[in-house]
Image (tube, rainbow, N blue to C red):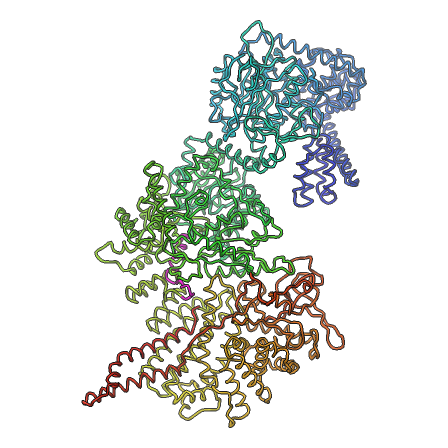
Amino acid sequence: MEDIHRRALTESITFLKDNLFVKGVLDHLVEENIITFDLKQLINFAVTDGDKVSELVCMLPKRGPRAFDAMLKSLRATSQEHVAIHLEQKAVEIKENQDAKTQKFVHQWLQDNIDLSNDAAGQCTMVNFESLLDAVNMALNASDHLTESVTATDLKMMLGKAFQLSEIAMNQSPLPFVMKGNLQIHQQVAVSESPTTSPDVKHLPKLMKDWSVANVCLWLEKIGMDGDVCKQFIQHKISGKALKLMDKADFIEMGLILGDRVVIIKERDKYLKEERDEYLKDSSCLNQESASEAMASASVKLDFTSVEDSECISLKSERDGINPPQPLKHEIGSRQFASLCSDDISSNAQYFCEPVAEKDSCVEHHMDSANSCDSLQNQEENKTSQTDVSENIPSSSAPNAEDSNDKSEGLISDSVSETVETGQTSSSKAIEESLITKFKEPSEILRPFGYQLGFEFEYKKDAKLSCVETRSGGNLLQPIHRFVMPALDSPEGMKELANEAIAFASACLNDRANATIHFGIVPEVSSGFTVHGQIMGLHLKKNWEQYEKFLNKAFAYGFSELEIVQNCISSPMFIRVASGDSSNESLEYVIEIDVKPKYEYSQNKEFFIKLKGEKDDAEAIFRIINGDVCRLQQPQIDFYRQELDKLAKERKKQEDKAARKNCIPRDHLCEKFINLLCDGDTKFQGDQYRILVLNKPDETVDFESFKETFDFLADIEWKAIFDFDADAKVCRFLQERDYMMKIAMSDDFSPHSKYNLQKIDRLKQTHEDIRNSLNPTWIFVNGYAQNNEQKLDPINWKMEKSDGFKEAVRFFSRQIPQRRALVVFLLLSEDTKVVIEATEEFLTSFPNQWLCISENESIGNPWLQELERRNCMERGIERSVFGMPWKHVQEAIAHIVTPRRMDCCELPTSTGTFIVLPKKVMNKFLDLEILSSFECDSSPITSNIQELNIHEVKEKEMFFRGNGVSWWNFWFQDQVCSRDILHHLKKDVKESFDDDDDVGKVILRHQPGAGGTTTAKHLLWELRKEYRCGIVQSINEGQTAQQIINLYQYEDNRPTKPVLLLLDNPDEEKANLLVAELSEMAKSLTRKGGDQAKCVCIFLICLRRTEVGTDPRRLVLQHQLSPVERKWFLDMDKQLLAKYKQAPDRFMDPKLLISFNILKENFNKEFIQRTVRSFLDNISDKKELRLLKYISLVNSFDLECRSLPTSAFDGIMIDYPWSNRTLRRGRHAYASRWETHLSSEFRVLVNEASKPSMGYIHALKVINPLLSKEILLCLRDAGSSRIPVSEIALEFYKCADIFYAPSKARDDLLEISKDILKKRGRLPNGRPETYFAPLIQTIVNEEIPEKASAVLEIGIQLTSDPFIAQQMARLFIKFQNWPEAIKYATMAIEQKPDNSFLWDTFGRIYERQLLEQYDKLVAGTNLLKVENSASIIDIALKGMEMFRKVQETNDREKTLATNQAGFFGELQMVVCLLDCLTYFFPSKDELRHFILEAQYMPEDYAALQNIDGNNYADKLKQLNRRVQTAVNRLEDELLQLREEAIDEFGRNHIKNQSDSLICLKENLNSYFGEDGDSVPEVLKEWEKCEFRRRRIFRLAGFNLRSIFDLRHKKDGMDILKRIRDIAKLNIGSDQVNVDDYQTLISANLALASLDSEYRSNFSEYEDMLLWTKKLYELRDTSFVSHLEPYLFFVMFNWPRENMRKQLVNPRVIEDAIRNWKDAYYKKYPKQRGEGKPFRKKDTTMFFLANGSNMESIYSYFARNGRPLENYWRLPSTMAKLQRLCGTLNQDGCEVKIQLQYGQGNKSSISIPTSFPIRERTMWNKQVYFVIGFSWIGPKAFDITLDDPRTVLQTSRDGSPPRNFLGKEFHRTSKVVEVTEEHFRQELENFDKKLQRIKDLKERKNRSLNLTHEENQLLQEEARIKKEKDRLIQIRRKKMESRIPEF
């Protein structure tokens, strides 16, 4: 495409994006053969229309000269005339501007430099300035060098042409002029004769191919053509090269008449024949030396335009005025592709060009010869030899060093040698010399693949090749050879030549295999007169160039991917066959074509071809099958497409491997670089923290260069990258390579930046994100163009940016362990001014921990010198590597680290197919490790059997030693024992798929080291092809759940299978948060209207527990193998031992596989003891023993069995580690990296692993928890006496060398060390396993409490953790040291005042104090005067105050865990206080009167009104209100809200709460309730009402839950009726209150749900409507917050079918709903914010049903006592519910309903949907639904577009479907509670018996006779005392257990 047209397109890009419709244009461009179908698809792949336009505009300039006109034609064909006009006008505008600019410059230059005066010219002439200007313009138009802008050099050259053109085109004499100054005219042709003479042929260059347009015009004049013909040649710019290629059609297209065409063609052919004859004549006179010189002078630079149909491809000489030399003998191998001429081989196709060698080649390892010629002589020295060379005989191409850096632009390339670019000049010269020597005589071996040998190479006639035809194999770089003997004397033979060549090339390209086809060597199938592999040669009837042109044309015809053919297929090479018979003058050749499918070009493409002789549209694809070139049929094509990606990856892998293997720089710079980078080693080992610093790359460096030189940046793990390039070139390059990173600005680290000042916690959050991120942080230090932050100069940078930069560096210096950092400076350009200013901070923060690399010393040395001048570093420190090419750096690093794994990840779909998860998409799942359906299958290692075998042994040994199981262990057969529980686990998982939950959970409990995680991963492996499987690596609020949803939906429109994910021993709080978030998101997914909700995700949860229980309903894995499992381990042990004995150098001794042996021995304790002692005895290094002691201590008591960061122990493993003089480089490096030379015995017991921490760090861990306990025990017994655990713990926590060197590693170790002081395990029932954390509990059990407190005290000092202070308080509570307990509880609260659990601990202090007082009362040690009860009351009131603090803080906490201990604790304190007070009051009834009757104050108790200024009497009388408030809140929350839990711990926790509440209510009822229904008549009316309420409180309570629970009791119906009747009496009184109405309505609803007859015959419905209205009006008079008034009012007054009377206007209902929601959030402030993960779910107990009156309200009742959460989905229920219709709003969250009331009046009201409807097709349409009344208001359930009542089917018995699983709201527990009254009665019985025994003893002492029965009673004394003590203990435990653990 012409430059003007290209500019017209690019300068119109904005207009085209706004106006161009691409789709239609593409179809027309395909029809016009401008673009291919593949290119059309490529454009369509663009996301937006604007992107498609950009792709098209970028592509069109490369599609040939017809592209612009075809584009205009396509626009007009698609009715886009305005776009076409715009482009045409733009082209004209550009042309005019360009011409005007050129004319202005030419005019001015001629005026400045040309003197046309008569004196200057030396003669009188009439030539004026305009004539000269016209002549120069004509020269410019005829020039091949005309560009957009003309330079002075161009004009000086054009003046020379003006001499000739003035004669030819203008019939003028030469223009006389004189150059001003010293300027010289650059004439293209040296004219020796007078310019006035007529033109002659001797003025022309000798070779036609070197003629310029002016030369062609001279020649045309010579043969008699007139001026019009010359002008046509000038207009079309026909040079000599073009003239040689032109055929009849070309001349016709030019518009030449027939006569002129015939003359021109005849004279041209005649001239070319003479040219060839002269060449042959002169060549016989040249010896080999002169030939070599002629060869060396060749230098032609190629310049091709796109190939379009039969358009000519012109060649351009590299420098005008110099004739290229002609090759000798049989030089061939041209890069050019000739114009597509007719099928006949025409002599006018002959031309030559010089090939270009592939740059910087080196020989492939399997080849023994090569040719890489250097530049020999320059062209000026060889001008004389150029004219003496004939061009008839072809020869193999010789590379020219001048062109070695130019990329070929020809159609077919010679750059197919199997090389790796290293730039080795001297070595290639030596190889060349050896090859010349080797091939001095005719060769009997094949030409080395890919090398264009010189003219001296020949084949020997009839020689039998030792290398015969080869077949494709595993090595794609080893060339395939194919021999063919075509008959070239017939058209069929020529067709065979073409078809064989292109079919073979297609097959090799599709196979991605290097190959050579040899025409002229006998193939395997031949006649009986020849031998396979015999060199015969082909006799060429015509010139070899004609055959070359024919083959080039065939390739262009056959292949559509011209650019790939150009770069992957060589030009035909014509190699002379020497017969040895001098009499044989015929020339015979072997024609060879090399095919090299470089991955760079072939990638994942398919190569279809068209064969000559077949239909034009018939395309075929070929592959090499069983050694033959075979055409594929459709099934084979389909199979090939499946294998193509794998084949392409294999090609790339082998290319990369060959590159790394053959080009390893070994000079001193490489060694120095590796030494500095690897701490003196040859590879990365141990724990290293690397930081990268980059400056701006050079402007000339592009992305292609980055690929070749900077891929290594993605292979090294960097902790941070400081980038001084505002354009982010390197960053963008790595992002395109799928390198994950977090991007930050240096200002993000400054506390004074505007971003951090706006948000206080932002800086802290930034630090935490970096500390916890697995990806490096990319920090832009000096601007970021993408954020419109521009680069600053050094002065402004220091003022504006340096503060943030310094804070960033200092932050990382605090995170990285001292002496473990390495700051790597990559200086990419001379732009180092700001870097120098910043370097000082790096060198200060990381002294002697840096390395500087620069490719050029001119960049690195000034940087280094400036730093030395500034005294930033000592002089002479060798920490820089200057002069090492970036490519060599990349190659060196390739041998240090393994390149990033890029295996393909495939996922199953709901249709059974598999889809590829791209790397870029997979990188977005930061919190998940996704298991591919074909994990490990696509790994490159699987194609190399030897490497695969080594890898198999390595993986097995690592796993059997105790490392975690890898996916390779499952991929290799028989490396993992299939546990018996796996079958049950799989069964439970698959059953969960049918569960109705949005999120399913399957729990596997396992003891540490029992193989639970391995078994869970085994299940994932087995199900990976059915379900999308993975592992949750971390849980981040909001992010992890969204990633799971994205994985569930990825490329699957209607997923029917859930995601299966492993949660391995998750944090309970985080796991519940994840489940809650995911459930919330799952509900908002698009669902079909009537379908049940489908499960989105199944969590396979592994819980590591010391005790797992033996419940057969649970899945547990203990330290016990089954016989089948044990047999597997024993058999495996035999295999391992046999292999070890067979090859001990290859296989590890099975005795060292500790983890495997522990399981083999079935966790035998004695075996573990023997093993540990045997290895410990061989560890003599005191540092190692100390390290092992600390590691075993932490691993023994860490419930999560975590790895410990290695570098945290530097302080105890290195002497003086923090000295700046102790270098970690050179000779000091090995000693500093202590982790690399630990003893072998240590490594057997302790595993090395990587641990997530600001990326990944090196970590240590005892391989098995059982082993760690035994190691610790052995180390404790090492001396004469056993060392206490507390002594080791104190030694560890006091170790300053570990804990007082700040770093992220130290912080990680400190976090684990804190946990072992405070975290407790849990029993299967959900209760804590121990009272304290395991470490503290062990010390308490084995030693004294003071030792435990000493350990906790040092933990508090070290960590300042409030929860460790809490543990200290709990320790003192346990041992009743109340002042110390209060001290540490206060300390914890002061640090974290908003934590409800800390306040709970404070409350427990007073609870235990009160229990202590109770014990004294029971033992009879307290004075029983009323005034003495004040201290007890004071303790109780303080405790209740603490528990109310728990209630307040719990409502404010934004956590998923709900702490109800505040309400339970307050009720427990009330019960315990009243139990204590019974010892101070004459009777319990007296105490009840005192606390229940406000006016009752006997004189004996008046003292309580003022004790030290406290009115204890008044506070006691307020207990009733506090009790009702707390009980109501607990019962309401259990009924009205539900919470998710990851296992039955959560359900047990809820059950424990329910059981505790029952116990407390039983005790409270005895104080605040009434035992009989009869009301004393003497009471006043208000007292009677209060009596009835206390009776109802004793029977059930005022809460809906307590009343509905009576339905499950045996006599529940009778009790409900009694409650109803009692409540009716109060309603008839003028003292009625809220509780009375609420109780009566609740009782009637409970009875109606129990008895259908009661429901249908209910006659008080209108009274119920009135009661609900009264209840709603009185709602604010209650001191207890109730939601029932809103529920009953809205539910009973909701307009419905068959409603007799409407008492309430719908507007009032709408207001009530709004008030209801406000009351809900006031009662439960933690529930604010829809969709928040810490919200519980509100339950729905009632639905609007068909029918009238009481039958219109439906509530499910299961007689088995198990109410269901989703009971409304039962078919039997759905048939009963009333279905309404309304309009779903636009966001799918509300339904608008038309309500009708009164005399047909209507009103609309909106209610929320039960979950958002995301299916947009349902929005703004009429929908059908049922109404449920939840505790926050009415909601629309089961929303559908169609009325399902017409298709609803109900099961006959009304039972739920077989697969229907519901959740319980609650379960009524059978709990037996002993009240204080019963306890006192039992205690009194024991006391009476003991008093009787005491009396009998006195009688016996007085020698009185006793009866037989009395003597027996005396013998029972000990038993009775024991039973009494047991009763007291049981009572105490009951009192302590009333508050469930939170």
Position of residue 490 in the picture relative to residue 992 (left or right): right
Q: Is residue 1172 above or below residue 558?
A: below
Between 1552 and 1913, the one nearer to me in the picture: 1913
User: Residue at left 32%, top 45%?
Assistant: 1152
What stretch of residues is rendered in magenta? 1302-1327
Spot occupied by residue 787 in the image (x, y as percentages of width and height): 59, 49
Q: Is residue 1780 left or right of residue 1469?
A: right
Measured as percent of width and height from the top left, residue 1886 is found at 32, 83
Q: Nearer the viewer, residue 87 or 1019?
A: 1019
Quarter of the figure with the C terminus:
bottom left
Whether residue 1784 is visible? no
> How far across and down, in percent of the image, does residue 202 sit?
70, 11
Q: Quadrant of the N terminus?
A: top right
Residue 133 placed where, x, y %? 76, 24
Q: Using residue 1429 as the reference point, say whether residue 464 is left or right of it.
A: right
Choose between 1181 and 344: the one closer to the eye: 344
